[in-house]
Amino acid sequence: HRDLHSFPTRRSSDLHIEGGQEQSGIDIRIQRAPTLTVKGRVAGIASPASHYELSADVPVGFGWTSESGKIQPSGDFTFEGLAPGKHIFRLLEHGPNGTQIIAETEITLADQDVTGVVITPFKPAEVRIRVVREGEEDKPLTSGAVFLIPEGKENRFNGASQFEAQSSMYVFHGVRPGKYEVQFNHVPGCYLKSVEAAGRMLDPE
């Protein structure tokens, strides 16, 4: 089955619905086509296979549809019934910090099955961010919102946010490796001046 994780925004035309009226005559056509199989293995999983889940996600507008699959104790997996096109395979781990994405790879299916796929997990990071007003560095802010936004237009809706500081820090768990944009708002009368990490100023412009 397919689960719709987010409403698609890509469309061929708009549908205007009048308030208080019944509207019929709307047809959605689908096409029957051969489906494909992907086989592979997950390398180096540390916990029992039941702690992991693999999904094959197909981008649709700003959302996606997804097929979920099980991983065998050996690490092997098989996905059947996939349509041709670009699929993003994501490995999820169900652990003490909730469900985290620990691996991601893109596979484009054309007209034949794919075998020998190897998915290698990465170790999620913990990111701790402190927010201070200029001249009041010894008094970190604990109100407002901090956002971590992944690089790339197609990933901007997969960012993370924190609206509450913990011990003067905004803490993000399960952050995947990559490049991020940092944003902060919801404090009146202030603007974001700079971001510093490990003693280095990031993109002062």
Image (spheres, rainbow, N blue to C red):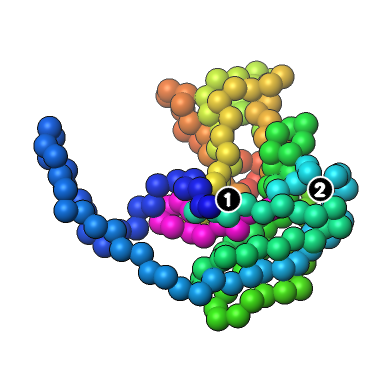
Helix, strand or loop for disc 2? helix
Which SS does the magenta portion mostly show?
strand
Q: Which residue sits at x=79%, y=44%?
A: 50
Mark earlier in primary sequence (1, 2): 2
Helix, strand or loop for disc 1? strand
Q: Is residue 200 visible?
A: no
Residue 87 percent across, percent down from the top left: 57, 64
Residue 117 in which image quadrant: bottom right
Q: Is residue 195 visible?
A: yes
Nearest to the observer: residue 155 or residue 77: 77
Looking at the rendered structure, the kind of residue marked 1 is Pro
Residue 11 in which image quadrant: bottom left
Q: Which residue sits at x=82%, y=57%?
A: 75
Nearest to the observer: residue 130 or residue 28: 28
**Alpha-carbon distance for marks 1 and 2?**
29 Å
In the image, residue 52 sits, relative to residue 169, either above or below, namely below
**Circle on res. 150:** 1
Please give the range of residues in magenta.
Answer: 54-64
In the image, residue 139 sits, relative to residue 38, either above or below, namely above
Residue 42 in which image quadrant: bottom right
In the image, residue 15 sits, relative to residue 185, either above or below, namely below
Q: Do tag 1 and tag 2 residues touch (Cβ < 8 Å)?
A: no
Residue 168 percent across, percent down from the top left: 68, 21
Residue 90 percent across, percent down from the top left: 65, 55
Residue 126 percent across, percent down from the top left: 74, 38
Number of other residues with Cα within 10 Å of mark 1, as a class: few under 14, some 14 to 19, many 20 or more: many
Looking at the rendered structure, the kind of residue marked 2 is Ala
Q: Which residue sits at x=67%, y=54%?
A: 69
Residue 59: say if magenta. yes
Question: Which residue is tagged 2?
Answer: 49
